[in-house]
Amino acid sequence: MASARLRGRRHHRRRRAVRARNAGAAAGAQGGGAQRACSGGRYRAGQLGDRAGPSERAGMSVLPPDLDAAGFAAFLDDLRAVVGPDWVWSGDEDMHAYRDSFSPVWNTEQERHASAAVAPADVEQVSAIVRVARRHRVPLFPISTGKNFGYGGPSPNVNGSVVIDLKRMNRVLEVNEARAFALVEPGVSYFDLYREIEERGLKLMVDCPDPGWGSPVGNSLDRGVGYTMPHYRDHFGAHCGMEVVLPDGEVMRTGMGAMPGAQTWQEYPYGFGPDPSGLFAQGNFGIVTKMGFRLLPLPEYYRTCLITVPKRRDFVKLVEHVNYLNDSGLISEVEYGSPLRAKMADPQFMALITKVGGVSDAELDAAAEAAGLPCWQVELQFLGPERATWENWLHAKERILADISGAQAIEGEHFALPASQQQLDHPQQPWTSAIKRKRSLGVPSLGEWKIVRDDGHIGFFPVLPRTGEAVFEMQRVLGDAMKEFPTLPPFFNALTTPLMWHTHTFQMVFAPSIRHDDPAHNAISHAAMKKCVEVAAEHGWGDYRAAPIYQDAVADTYSFNNHALRRFHEQLKDAIDPDGIIAPGRGGIWPRRFRA
Ligand SMILES: Cc1cc2nc3c(=O)[nH]c(=O)nc-3n(C[C@H](O)[C@H](O)[C@H](O)COP(=O)(O)OP(=O)(O)OC[C@H]3O[C@@H](n4cnc5c(N)ncnc54)[C@H](O)[C@@H]3O)c2cc1C
């Protein structure tokens, strides 16, 4: 079966990964088919998952908005005429693969289901599908490799949407070593791109997210992140040039791609005039069919080092120094941490770091002194010529040790690149390290699936300023707010350290698990997510990325001047896609047809 062939292209068979991917397949019976209108919200009734009564929960059959069974059948026939009968699916078994197995509303009435999926082979077919969808007024939900787990997986915003699955469009169109860029189709995974570079022996590094089975196109369109040098980690920021099928089926190219014969599509992003490429990230203005990315010339050498600082307040200065190193392009990704985490099994210590109102400097310093441990550490990574990595390390060490009393420095592993399999698989750091060797060196893997607890997780990732003070404030504010949910782990406590995924801001992680057999637990995670979004917004901290089920709530928090930004987006949406053919609701942007 065609869908099995598509799924068969997936690269890894680790038990956990397969379980997560196929988790949807465990659920059961046939659904009722007809959707049911319901009331509420800014959005038109009936489209947000309230599709059937409780007896139908486990089934998936659902129709697109405003279409009856006969209309749906006619629509599917028109799709088959475009892509061939093997590449359109609507049966329950096939549609399991398009459920969000990390959904907090798994198997409930709120779960959002696609009605069908279609897999085009090329941009002409994408265009034709959009025109068919426009004729039948059926919303499409584009996915590239559809692995957006934690942020909605492959499932749509609107119940009954048809997934346009771009995995078949999997050509690496160009990798240019001398000019350090790639041009790829949406179905190209990080594994595919890495393999192409390896097989051709090109001296280039890909900046990849944790799971390698995602795609540069899908990941960057959701503003995903990686783990190498500052200007590559922000994947949308590192893209250059895209081709897009617009809601009327027209094909458009951004930047230099708009000029026939231009040679610099993947090198100069703007071309001339306004650059609309930002509209396609976390937006719903088109389907991206090609995208360019800047690649890092393969560095000659890799070096790691650790700095520890003794006192709680030292974190403020430590952050300032690391920001300087980052902004000067001297370091790769950093991992902040606290050696005091070793004490978290001690209930008294736990009570201290989760105390209401936050811990004081004196209290944490006293606990650190009693434990004989420093309060904080940062792992630094250097990429570049061997001598430069050494000099940059010396510079970092001298700078920090001269400024922070009691700071200590330890040298870690260092070696020439490309790394050997042994170096990739068996890091030998002289400290307990949080660095994930493969992702730090741009080698895609599925190793990080081990962080997945229960059946998956949802995620709130607030953006905060890169200062120690902001970190302390977020620890306290969100730590206190989350006390309402005592069964969840204390994600925000006095030792929670920030991530430096994006070049110029910090992020913290809140990722409560979900369990397919425990709706009560899921309801707690769900409520805690919503609370986090709300409380964080009161302090000016916004989520950077969200699953469809949270996108309206998150978009609501970006409300300056009576939601001027959303009103602008919706004016544009009304102008080019009033019927909501492309992903209505994505990014909190609803076309007229779906607005209350
Ligand atoms: C354990 C774990 C670790 C993770 N680590 C990371 C990480 O380090 N970094 C990170 O960024 N993410 C991470 N993720 C989240 C996710 O797995 C990756 O971001 C993944 O790359 C996204 O899936 P994808 O590339 O298949 O994108 P898709 O699912 O294909 O796309 C994502 C979204 O973008 C839109 N879209 C996709 N393609 C198109 C298109 N062609 N045109 C228009 N819109 C489109 C759709 O709305 C889609 O839902 C992690 C998840 C897990 C479970």
Image (cartoon, helix red, strand yellow):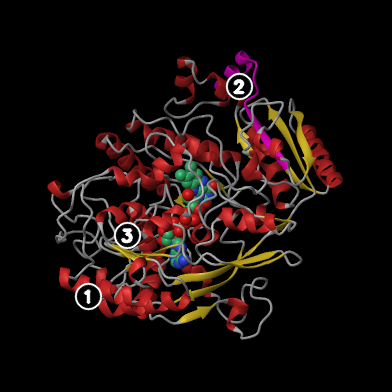
Judged from this view, the residue extending furthest toward the bottom is 260
The answer to whether one can see residue 462 in this image is no
Q: Position of residue 546 (x, y in %)?
A: 41, 52
**Residue type for callout 2:** Asp
Residue 542 inside the magenta-drawn segment: no
Mark 2 Cα shell of 10 Å, populated few (<14), some (14-19), many (≥20): some
- Mark 1 or mark 3: whose residue is earlier in sequence: 1
Q: Quadrant of the C terminus?
A: bottom left
Judged from this view, the residue extending furthest toward the top is 370
The answer to whether one can see residue 19 in this image is yes
Task: Residue under label 3, please give it.
Answer: 157
Q: Position of residue 32 (x, y in %)?
A: 14, 56
Q: CA distance from mark 1 to mark 3?
A: 23 Å
Which residues are drawn in magenta? 363-381
Viewer-nearest residue: 351 or 124: 124
Residue displayed at 32% across by 32% down: 484
Task: Residue under label 1, please give it.
Answer: 74
**Residue 137, numbered label:** none
SS at mark 3 in the image: loop
> Which one is closest to the eye, mark 3 or mark 2?
3
Q: Position of residue 466 (x, y in %)?
A: 60, 46
Count how many numbered circles sit on residues in the image. Answer: 3
Q: Is residue 237 left or right of residue 250?
A: right
Disc 1 vs disc 2: Cβ atoms closer than 8 Å?
Answer: no
Mark 1 Cα shell of 10 Å, populated few (<14), some (14-19), many (≥20): few
Q: Quadrant of the N terminus?
A: bottom left
Viewer-nearest residue: 404 or 389: 389
Task: Residue under label 2, please give it.
Answer: 365
**Residue type for callout 3:** Asn
Residue displayed at 38% across by 81% down: 248
SS at mark 2 in the image: helix
